[in-house]
Amino acid sequence: MPASPIRKLVPYAEAAKKRGVKVYHLNIGQPDIETPKMALDAVRHFDFKVLEYSHSAGNESYRRKLATYYQHAGIDVNYQQIIVTTGGSEAILFGFVSCLDPGDEVIIPEPFDANYNGFAVAAGVVVKPLTSYIETGFALPKADEFEKLITPRTKGIVICNPNNPTGYLYSQEEMDTLKALILKYNLYLFADEAYRDFCYSGKHISAMSLKGVEDRVILVDTISKRYSACGGRIGALVTHNQAVLDTVLKFAQARLSPPSFAQILGEAATELPPDYFDSTKAEYLKRRDVLVSRLNKIPGVFCPNPGGAFYAMAKLPVDDTDTFCQWILESFAYDNQTVMLAPAGGFYGTKGLGKQEVRLAYVLNTTDLNKAMDCLQKALEQYPGKTH
Amino acid sequence: MPASPIRKLVPYAEAAKKRGVKVYHLNIGQPDIETPKMALDAVRHFDFKVLEYSHSAGNESYRRKLATYYQHAGIDVNYQQIIVTTGGSEAILFGFVSCLDPGDEVIIPEPFDANYNGFAVAAGVVVKPLTSYIETGFALPKADEFEKLITPRTKGIVICNPNNPTGYLYSQEEMDTLKALILKYNLYLFADEAYRDFCYSGKHISAMSLKGVEDRVILVDTISKRYSACGGRIGALVTHNQAVLDTVLKFAQARLSPPSFAQILGEAATELPPDYFDSTKAEYLKRRDVLVSRLNKIPGVFCPNPGGAFYAMAKLPVDDTDTFCQWILESFAYDNQTVMLAPAGGFYGTKGLGKQEVRLAYVLNTTDLNKAMDCLQKALEQYPGKTH
């Protein structure tokens, strides 16, 4: 098991804070947006006396309201096609162990969320990374690139849309490419759509809306980012494939039930007004614009404009971002402040890639983002390992 | 993946309720004991505005207090040897995936908690069941019986103490047998001690207290039964083995964090007075005595006296408890009431065993328990599949 690329710099950040340096955290997708008060209040006002197991598939009342949420998002499912999970994490794990055998292979466009590795290792599944490139903004690789990786053990493709870590939003044409591949090679498509509600350029095309492959698509989802409720650990696995649902339910029964308190929160949040996401989206959009524009103004830095989520990838003029991200915490400060970034190497399955890239999560307000960019700019001026 | 033996009769129970029949649930370990109010209140009074990820290993403040709880229970650990998990379920899964490779074998005395199968399947681990017998009250099989099952792929033994589903409490001598085996064959001992605080006959000997095998013992634990907080989904993996802790932490990081709300509850519960368990234990003891005595008075029924937990196994004078437990829900009622039991076949890894046995969870008050026993007694008088 590889260590988390996001968390391995934590000791250096902690040491910096102990020295009195203010650290701007752009390294982790922990939004600063407030969790909707009405949803938190629903938890405060629970009235049971025994904290019981819920149904293994989640509370029916919650699943019914979730189905309505999905229908509004253009995803035609009923509540029986939804199994509530402990975060999106468990949805991915359940998807892997229910659809794949140990030794089976899945193709994942890289860079990808490093946590997928953990679930693949746990399920004995082999990850075949397929490189996408910062120069094209991390567009989906062409069909023939996928086909080069397909073997008799290939059983699935995993995508995250909009993408973590790149922010890339897949087009209708790219989704159709994926559809053709899963049809031609009889694959599962595991679609992580955790950031569905945060798209800025273009429309989100859910994998669940692809026609003719309904029984091949496994949607993995979470309320963590949608409602800024990361600590709740509530997600969902959604599919039209009844056999997969039956198997997932057995794994769900083995772990008894998803967390009860956060199901209350999730259920309440489904009642938020349709314009709830407007202000959150507007805020993220403003941040994205500040971040991307600041980054591209720094000499030698390139950051493609992400279409969704709240991440951006940037190429820095340094030899190795692992070293740079440690240096900026350990040996640098500007106005007694510094910034924490995620070196991108850990998001690549292919060793050696991403060494000049970092992921930035724009989870801070624009004032702090600007200060963080001041730090990055100064740091790049001073860094001894600069390449040009 | 096999279906849960506890839950597969649910549709028949639901149909009975729809017919207006009152169903006494002795089939599932969902205690009716109230969750401590002070712990629920701690959740009600949370004061954050953003429901953030916690530390992947759990909140440090909670882990520190948990360490104190363990020290009081005679388990000498510090907070860095504790990783907070999503229920005991995740602790078992993390233990398996961190210590074992796909294809490795674990020996589990049967009958055992059927959910272990789910985690073994997910981790690609092969379960080798070793039969214990109702006639001896489900005492631990002798060392030579274990040795017959040991192969080069055997990497661990899994025990639950006190035991679910049998209620058996392992003696010091039995724990020493296990210690000798793990030493001789260099195995891990996965010890599920979820019911540690509910022992009625004799003292609980934690696997963590075995001397000389500190780095081979993995404790899996949960607050579900301890504080009647099943829906919280908070457990822990505890071990002195630093390499295992390092690997578990990586899996913990992949799934980001355990649920935040129930960590608040768990932390508050560590502050309960030392006599908190006295009244709960007294209540369970009273129930056990009623249940066991009623069962053994029914002609043809045998129920050994369990030393801990809140389960009893009983042998019934019927040909097949799968059929009987369905019949009693579907075709029987006494005073418009009936009882739901868990057929024991699903708790055995060896096919065909346990067909005359049921598991009963004494999670109802004695009045209801007596009514449930009235139903069982009448049902056995009327059941067409009786063996004698």
Image: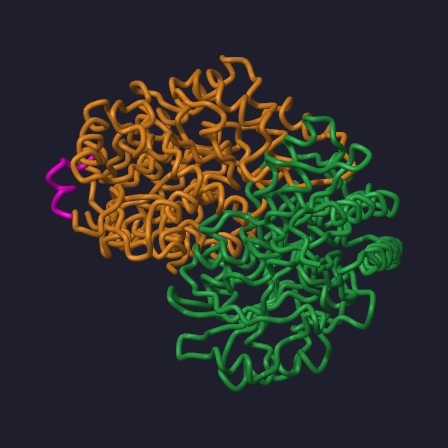
Chain colours: A green, B orange
Q: Position of residue B90 (x, y in %)?
A: 47, 44
| Residue drawn at point x = 39 percent, y = 32 percent | B239
Specify start and end residues of the magenta stretch as a single range.
B140-149
| Residue drawn at point x = 52 percent, y = 65 percent | A245
Q: Nearer the viewer, residue A161 or B132?
A: A161
Q: Does the magenta stretch mainly form a helix, a strand or a loop?
A: helix
Dividing the picture into quadrants, the one containing residue B237 is top left
- Asked if residue A156 lies left or right of residue A202, the reply is left
Q: Is residue A33 visible in the rendered structure shown here? A: no
Q: Position of residue A208 (x, y in %)?
A: 65, 73
Q: Residue B147 colored magenta?
A: yes
Q: Position of residue B290 (x, y in %)?
A: 37, 26
Q: How many marks?
A: 0
Q: Nearer the viewer, residue B316 or A81?
A: A81
Q: Residue B162 colored magenta?
A: no
| Relative height, residue B188 to residue A238 (above, below) | above
- Asked if residue A113 lies left or right of residue B6, the reply is right
| Residue drawn at point x = 52 percent, y = 48 percent | B21
Q: Is residue A126 visible in the rendered structure shown here? A: yes
Q: Nearer the viewer, residue A110 or B77?
A: A110
Q: Nearer the viewer, residue B159 or A117?
A: A117
| Relative height, residue B349 to residue B41 (above, below) | below
Q: Position of residue A281 (x, y in %)?
A: 84, 57
Q: Quadrant of the C terminus of chain A?
A: bottom right
- Asked if residue B176 lies left or right of residue B33, the reply is left
